[in-house]
């Protein structure tokens, strides 16, 4: 629904007249009804289809008259089609699908492989839907697709330029400020289905440099063409363009030549290919690159056009004034704007002669060297400056001149709150050409910015690379800020987490330029841990949190200069301060959505925050509550019940609803279990879902406390912020997010000041879902144990904590940890841990461990494995028992399978596995392998990825260790495949170790648009260094690792002096 945009509506537990009611999907042309059977062991022969019914093991299900999809966790079928991209078996209007959760997760990961931020946004949205118990989703309700905004900062008027559009390729060339970008708006109305791409929309555009990249251009065009978020290559995009006949309008190609010249030819070649079938209009200043397209030179406005603009944009209608402005400007669009703005401000026209160029105008307002020197400040950074910074950077005299000049000529600048930039880059060009002592200004500004950053000040961090500091300054900054202990300190004084994230991503960009001799392995490891921490995003798109947080910061006295980023925090701040939601809109925008949806959601979210305390301030009337209770069941029923329970608890003066009042009172004040049982009884009578009772009561209780009406046992009132964070940070990130929001909202309502720095624990908190930053710690823990930095009890406690908090459970983590140990770890685990509480599939361990499993564990795991399948006529997947078959317990497995009449199902491609089954005498059935999933080394390499099995291939290519470090695995994660380095002699890897790690950290996608993930660095970096650089002291690495774990809100718990396991076992009896 989100990626391909074909599904328009989803209903869960749909109210229909048939049995395929788990999910109802609607597209433009069809209805799909889904039934999910969450059990395994079903055979195709168990399914009978007749008379518009499907019978599964004698249970009959009525089919819909539309398309029906039947999902099984596992069923052996010969697929003959695809449904929503998933292999299926079609019989008439029924599609049968065999898929488990891991495969679903894999499909999801691939859909979002190049857009992880979007995945976080959509997951957060889905969590909100679940929290509200909303069971319907419409496509229009989804968070909008982020395409580059093409709306100019400046308002546009259509003046009626006579541009003839006969050829397929037209190059419209124009001088600075002649109105090329505004002409685009006129061309859009004259062309067929225009796709607009702008390289520049305004001087404070946060996406400016990203827009200039060819890969981002392709991705943006593909989203506009296909209306989805899949990545298509250039060939597919050109093919789609040929069929669509869209006109492409590209505005500002000169920006690529000036600031990303290395990719200019890519753009020109794309245009040359597209112009064969599509009309292409390119607008640009004159290019140095020689082009062979038909050129139209854009002229000034005529008098009529000038008059229209002055009337529409500036409400200047007096004939004499219009005539004078035209005489001064000759209809040069940017001059018309400047002179009109001057007149609007002063009520007078400047006394100047007719102007022939934009430079001539700038010369009239900057008449001396002092002005040029002062304003050259704006050449020192392509980002903004705060007003308060100007005198600090330029000195009092020049600073005062700049402020006075800005006040006199505000139309020459783009001003957002207290952020100032030049309005038009023609002014930038003028200053660069005319300023004679710019190098001194640049050096002074760079020195002050560097000193500020090195002293620990935050204000310039998010703008680091906009200053283009010298390499020695970048190196000093990198070394200082890539210490994880300093990062923790920095985090504690950061209220703008997006600004800090921007800073560290810029450091990552700079790493390639820094000499490897200047930095240590410790710097590199710490930096990887920081990147994994800082990229956890808990607040983007969360309007309620952003609004309440910023409102409270204002109460505490933090003004807009503390928000230095250009992301959601600043966008919401700008909306709060100015009432202008355009920056927020640009962050969310998608031209395929009605903007009213964005505005309505924004206003609803903020109004809900503003009215949070007022909504429950008065008792609801009997009529009102009865009306709410008697409303037909819908997606908001449980939300209404929660509201009613809160109201009844707070006011307790309505006898008509005593049952509900008693239940919520008992739940809050006395016994939760008893209250849940009572509410479940009421739900049973009404036909409501019983499991919702506990959720509703828990949410109601938390809201009652969050309102601040009662003090007893209310942590929102009784704990200071530090105590509160310390108590709740071990919760999952979604719950912690709610707790933090509730706490800040309440202290803001009560006008109470707190130490807001404690929110740093929230910024760095491990993210419940899709946070793979702890994925590889099993490789580091055994090494740290051997060096006596940690013991096995602490390692297993840590792994268990992570598994318990992760929604996916990090299912592999404990298995992989044990695989890095000797078999003596087994009795240690058995003696020191509750086996039932461990999240582990013991049969996934290698045979040497299964050989030593005691009967108790073996039998329990066998029961758990087979419990997934139905008894009687069932099949077990080979992968679930492969290692048992390869162990000395194969006979025990065979006996149980024979007793229960189980078969093992195995792919016909698994020749070695089939031989093992035959040797063990285990009955099996074969399934036809899906040949489409096979990928060879050459194909992976061409896709820009490598896997462990590609060692011979990379050896044949002659790739060096540092070169393969740039290649991610299939999940676009670097340093994941350590086996690859066994291709080389150890001394070669040791010599290139820094370059390996630097190349991995700085590795980007093949189109250069995004960094690869560093999820495997925390564990694999330690293992790589320990394996190939044994002389390196790993104690600092452990201390950094420990800090990384703490920042994620986990602790390394247990007695540090406990000895590691050394028990010798020869058979399972030794456990006892």
Image: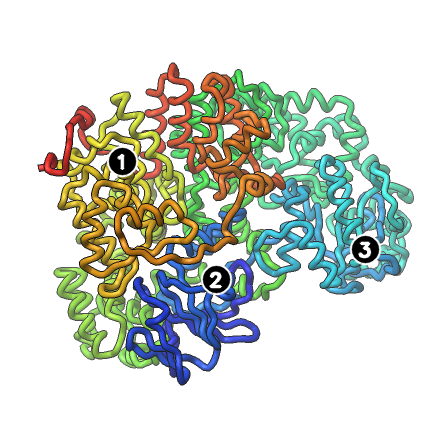
The Cα atoms of the two marked residues, 2 and 1, are separated by 35 Å
Q: Residue at x 35, y 66 (%)?
A: 133
Depth check, front residue: 470 or 411: 470
Tell me which label, 2 or 1, sits earlier in the chain. Answer: 2
Depth check, front residue: 9 or 598: 9
User: In the displayed structure, does residue 777 sit left or right of residue 258?
Assistant: left
Disc 2 versus disc 1: nearer the observer: 2
Disc on res. 818: 1
Q: Residue at x 39, y 75 (%)?
A: 20
Residue 687, compared with residue 463, is above or below; it is below
**Numbered circles on residues, count:** 3
The Cα atoms of the two marked residues, 3 and 2, are separated by 37 Å
Where's residue 542, x and y in %?
Answer: 45, 53
The residue beneath circle 2 is 87
**Residue 243 position by quadrant:** bottom right
Disc on res. 276: 3
Q: Residue at x 49, y 43 (%)?
A: 970
* Residue farthest to the bottom, as pictured: 51
Residue 610, compared with residue 1002, is above or below; it is below
Q: Residue at x 31, y 40 (%)?
A: 813
Classify 10 Å Cα crowding around label 3: few (below 14), some (14-19), many (20 and above): few
Residue 169, compared with residue 687, is above or below; it is above
Task: Please name the colour scheme applied to the rendered image.
Answer: rainbow
């Amino acid at each position: 629904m989100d990626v391909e945009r074909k599904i328009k509506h989803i209903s869960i537990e749909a109210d229909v007249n048939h049995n395929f009611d788990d999910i109802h999907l609607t597209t433009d042309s069809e209805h799909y009804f889904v039934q999910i059977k969450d059990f395994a062991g079903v055979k195709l022969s168990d399914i009978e289809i007749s008379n518009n019914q499907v019978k599964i093991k004698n249970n009959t299900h009525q089919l819909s008259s539309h398309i029906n999809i039947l999902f099984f966790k596992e069923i052996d079928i010969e697929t003959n089609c695809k449904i929503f991209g998933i292999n299926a078996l079609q019989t008439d209007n029924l599609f049968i699908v065999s898929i488990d959760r891991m495969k679903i997760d894999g499909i999801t990961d691939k859909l979002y492989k190049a857009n992880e931020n979007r995945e976080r946004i959509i997951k957060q949205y889905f969590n909100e839907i679940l929290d509200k118990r909303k069971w319907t989703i419409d496509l229009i309700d989804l968070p909008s697709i982020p395409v580059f905004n093409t709306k100019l900062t400046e308002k546009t008027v259509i003046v009626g330029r006579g541009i003839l559009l006969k050829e397929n390729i037209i190059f419209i060339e124009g001088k600075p400020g002649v109105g090329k970008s505004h002409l685009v708006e006129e061309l859009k109305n004259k062309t067929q289905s225009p796709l607009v791409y702008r390289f520049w929309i305004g001087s404070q555009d946060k996406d400016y440099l990203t827009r200039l990249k060819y890969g981002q251009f392709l991705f943006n065009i593909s989203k506009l063409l296909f209306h989805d978020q899949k990545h298509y290559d250039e060939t597919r995009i050109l093919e789609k363009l040929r069929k669509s006949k869209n006109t492409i309008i590209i505005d500002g190609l000169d920006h690529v030549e000036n600031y990303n010249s290395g990719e200019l030819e890519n753009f020109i070649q794309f245009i040359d290919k597209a112009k064969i079938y599509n009309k292409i209009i390119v607008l640009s200043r004159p290019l140095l690159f020689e082009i062979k397209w038909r050129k139209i030179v854009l002229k000034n406005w005529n008098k009529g056009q000038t008059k229209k603009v002055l009337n529409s944009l500036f409400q200047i209608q007096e004939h004499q004034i219009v005539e004078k402005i035209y005489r001064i400007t000759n209809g040069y669009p940017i001059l018309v704007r400047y002179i009109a703005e001057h007149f609007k401000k002063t009520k007078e026209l400047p006394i100047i002669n007719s102007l022939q160029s934009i430079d001539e105008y700038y010369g009239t307002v900057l008449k001396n060297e002092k002005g040029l020197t002062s304003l050259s400040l704006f050449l020192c950074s392509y980002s903004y400056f705060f007003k308060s910074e100007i005198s600090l950077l330029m000195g009092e005299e020049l600073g005062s001149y700049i402020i006075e000049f800005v006040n006199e000529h505000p139309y020459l600048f783009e001003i957002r709150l207290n952020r100032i930039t030049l309005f038009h880059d023609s002014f930038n060009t003028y200053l660069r050409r005319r300023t004679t002592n710019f190098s001194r200004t640049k050096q002074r500004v760079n020195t002050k910015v560097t000193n500020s950053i090195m002293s620990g000040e935050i204000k310039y961090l998010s703008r680091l690379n906009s200053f283009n500091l010298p390499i020695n300054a970048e190196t000093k900054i990198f070394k200082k800020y890539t210490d994880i202990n300093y990062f923790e300190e920095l985090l504690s004084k950061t209220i703008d987490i997006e600004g800090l994230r921007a800073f560290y991503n810029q450091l990552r960009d700079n790493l390639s330029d820094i000499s490897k001799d200047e930095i240590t392995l410790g710097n590199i490891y710490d930096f990887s841990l920081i990147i994994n921490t800082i990229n956890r995003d808990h607040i983007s798109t969360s309007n309620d949190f952003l609004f309440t947080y910023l409102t409270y910061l204002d109460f505490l006295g933090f003004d807009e200069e503390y928000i230095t980023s250009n992301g959601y925090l600043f966008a919401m701040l700008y909306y709060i301060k100015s009432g202008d939601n355009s920056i927020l809109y640009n962050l969310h925008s998608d031209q395929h959505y009605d903007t009213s949806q964005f505005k309505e959601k924004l206003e609803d979210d903020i109004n809900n925050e503003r009215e949070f305390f007022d909504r429950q301030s008065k008792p609801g009337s009997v009529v009102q509550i009865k009306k709410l209770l008697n409303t037909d069941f819908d997606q908001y029923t449980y939300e209404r019940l929660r509201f009613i329970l809160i109201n009844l608890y707070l006011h307790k003066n309505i006898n008509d609803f005593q049952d509900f009042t008693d239940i919520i009172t008992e739940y809050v004040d006395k016994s939760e279990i008893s209250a849940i049982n009572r509410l479940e009884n009421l739900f049973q009578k009404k036909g409501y879902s019983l499991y919702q009772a506990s959720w509703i009561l828990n949410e109601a209780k938390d809201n009652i406390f969050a309102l601040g009406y009662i003090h007893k046992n209310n942590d929102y009132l009784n704990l200071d912020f530090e105590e509160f964070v310390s108590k709740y940070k071990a919760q999952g990130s979604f719950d912690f997010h709610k707790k933090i929001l509730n706490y800040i909202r309440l202290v803001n309502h009560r006008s109470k000041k707190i130490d807001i720095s404690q929110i740093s624990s929230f910024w760095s908190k491990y993210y419940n879902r899709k946070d793979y930053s702890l994925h590889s710690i099993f490789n580091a823990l055994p090494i740290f144990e051997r060096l006596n930095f940690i013991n096995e009890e602490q390692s297993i406690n840590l792994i268990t904590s992570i598994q318990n908090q992760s929604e996916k459970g990090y299912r592999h983590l404990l298995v992989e940890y044990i695989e890095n140990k000797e078999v003596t770890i087994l009795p240690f685990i058995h003696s020191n841990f509750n086996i039932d509480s461990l999240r582990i599939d013991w049969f996934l361990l290698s045979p040497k461990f299964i050989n030593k499993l005691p009967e108790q564990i073996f039998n329990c795991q066998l029961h758990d494995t087979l419990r997934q399948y139905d008894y009687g006529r069932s099949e077990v997947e080979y992968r679930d028992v492969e290692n048992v078959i390869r162990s000395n317990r194969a006979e025990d497995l065979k006996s149980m399978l024979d007793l229960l009449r189980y078969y093992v199902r195995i792919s016909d491609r698994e020749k070695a596995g089939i031989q093992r089954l035959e040797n063990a005498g285990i009955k099996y059935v074969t399934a036809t392998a899906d040949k489409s999933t096979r990928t060879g080394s050459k194909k992976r390499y061409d896709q820009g990825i490598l896997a462990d099995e590609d060692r011979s291939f990379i050896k044949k290519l002659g790739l060096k260790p540092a070169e393969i470090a740039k290649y991610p695995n299939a999940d676009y994660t670097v340093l994941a495949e350590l086996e690859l380095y066994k291709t080389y002699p150890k001394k070669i890897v040791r010599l290139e170790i820094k370059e390996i790690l630097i190349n991995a950290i700085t590795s980007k996608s093949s189109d250069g648009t995004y960094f690869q993930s560093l999820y495997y660095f925390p564990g694999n970096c330690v293992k790589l260094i320990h394996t190939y650089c044994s002389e390196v002291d790993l104690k600092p690495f452990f201390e950094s690792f420990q800090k990384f774990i703490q920042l994620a809100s986990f602790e390394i718990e247990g007695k540090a002096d406990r000895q590691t396991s050394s028990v010798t076992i020869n058979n399972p009896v030794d456990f006892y």
